[in-house]
Amino acid sequence: MRGRVVRAPVRFLLAIAILASLAIWHLPVSAQAQAWSCDVPAPATPAASPTPAATPQPVEFPDEGGKLTVFAAASLTDAFTKIANDLKAADPNLDITFNFAGSQALVTQIAEGGAQADVLALASPAQMKSAVEDGIPVEGSATFVTNRLTVVVPADNPAGIASVADLAKDGVRLVLANPDVPAGNYARQSLCKTAAAGGPSVEDYAANIVSEEDNVRSVLTKVELGEADAGIVYVTDAMTSGDKVQSIEIPADQNVVASYPIATIGDNPLAAAFVGYVFSPEGQATLASFGFDPVSAI
Amino acid sequence: MLFLAIPLLALSWRAIAHLDNLQKAGRATVVDALVLSATTSLTSLVVIIGLGTPLAFGIARRSFRGKAVLETLIDLPMVMPPAVAGLALLMAFGRRGVLGGWLDDAGVRIGFTTTAVIFAQIFVSSPFYVRSARAAFSRVDRTVEDAAADLGAAPSRVWWTVTVPLAAPGLMAGAVLAWARAVGEFGATIMFAGNLPRETQTLPLAIYGRYEAGDLETALAMALILLVSSFLVLVSVRGLGGRLRLSAAD
């Protein structure tokens, strides 16, 4: 009696499981990433230099130091860490905490999660605009560096990529940041330009995307590990990887200028001092050493 | 108690309130993630039950050297942080991994495919089933099995008509818990399988992605789905637990 009572649900579960397994084999084998539209006006090409906003005046750090929280785009990880180390070497009482993530994630953490940040440095003006629209009280947003994109492949270049058009070759495993991440947005704009110049269409590139990461450094990691055949990241990211990746240049007329805005939130005096240092000759030189394009004279 | 209840109530309330606002694009994301989560978790469950049942039975009935080590090994993925599991899977099956490199040469691709999602789910949730199954099998009264054998039943008949039905409540409870863990898997999936809609973007990955992008409506809708299914899991496990007590009392 007990066996009969129990067997029915077991058979039912098994049936569902088998049906599900059958269903999975009927899923489209090549689940394609969404091809994106190229209607949005492209930002300025690298040839045109971005007009720098009024550069903040350098401010002295108070002797007693203090705590500072900086939320910065993932691509700024190494440069800002070096800047913090330089500042702390000069003023050991300084305690600077970083949160590096995709710009879209930083905005959400502050807007939705109520995270506290004194300085916000993002990889696109669009994300800074999004922060303002979400009600984050940013002040004094100004562009402090610009960046460009490059294609990266693992050191041994398993797919034999020699140009941007090769990314559309059959079977290439392409990894991009997802469209909400500035780097992902810029990458798609750049591919739009390459497609417009003749050659593979946007759909061909989209067909090769195997993963959409939530920050640009994850894209870099997948390429370094050899899991991806190619990725599109900032030139600064490629520099930090050194020998682990090869860079394939994107021609200037197909590349995208990424403008990085920085702003303060709240009235922590260290925030203004940090931003001032970023615009100073020393700060700009540090950023330039990591491959960024400075906005003020070094 | 309030600490547990308030987040759940807040989630349900806001999710239901936002449900009308779900845009068409959001609906597509939800459906894609739901279908993928359902099919991968059920496939994982089939594999876990298929391979885990004989394993659990063997551990329950036999004692051998190294049994303690094997049991610890089986329990390990349950305790291991998901990020560590993801890294481990990558080192084993990644393109340059221990086994993965050899598979890659043979043209078999695991990384970034739905198969990788299933691997990750199996890895983290199989302990839940195996532990429960092992306990269920060791609780089965051997004298009933012996009686059936004495009456002339072949071992396989004893297995299907006596052992399994007696162990069934424990087996099903373990299966349900393993399924719930598989559906919720995030860390190992995002590291090993990647994140691509309709291929590897399960519900937890989609929730995280939509939240980060500021698309709260879609994230809440998917969270509501998982919340309801978690509730159903609990109800069914408790129901099975009741049956377990009944069968043991006999």
Image (tube, coloured by chain):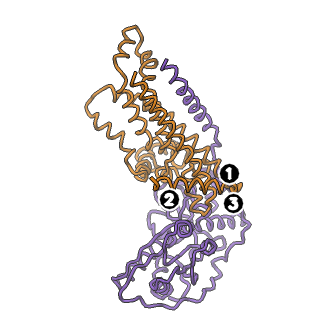
Chain colours: A purple, B orange
Counting from the top left corner in percent of width and height, residue A1 is at 49, 17
Type of amino acid at the residue the image marks with label 1: Ala
Q: Which is in the foreground here, disc 1 or disc 3?
A: 1
Counting from the top left corner in percent of width and height, residue A174 is at 58, 56
x 62%, y 68%: residue: A186
* Number of numbered callouts drawn: 3
Q: Looking at the image, can residue A172 be seen?
A: no
Type of amino acid at the residue the image marks with label 2: Val
Q: Looking at the image, can residue B160 be seen?
A: yes
Indicate the secondary structure of the residue bearing disc 1.
helix
Q: Do marks 3 and 2 share a chain?
A: yes
State if disc 2 and disc 3 touch (CB < 8 Å): no
Q: Is residue B88 above or below residue A99?
A: above
Counting from the top left corner in percent of width and height, residue A103 is at 55, 69
| Chain ID, mark 1 | B
State if disc 3 and disc 1 touch (CB < 8 Å): no
Towards the viewer: B4 or A5: B4
Is disc 2 surrounded by few (<14), some (14 to 19) or many (20+) residues within 10 Å? many
Q: Is residue B21 left or right of residue A135?
A: right
Pick whichever of labels 3 and 2 is earlier in the sequence: 3
Q: Is residue A129 left or right of residue B75?
A: right
State the CA–CA distance, disc 2 to disc 1: 29 Å
Q: Quadrant of residue A168?
A: bottom right
Is disc 1 surrounded by few (<14), some (14 to 19) or many (20+) residues within 10 Å? some
Q: Which residue is mark 3?
A: A36
x 45%, y 63%: residue: A244
x 58%, y 40%: residue: B39
State the CA–CA distance, disc 1 to disc 3: 16 Å
Q: Which residue is mark 2?
A: A223
Q: Which is in the foreground here, disc 2 or disc 1?
A: 1
Q: Is residue B155 above or below residue A131?
A: above
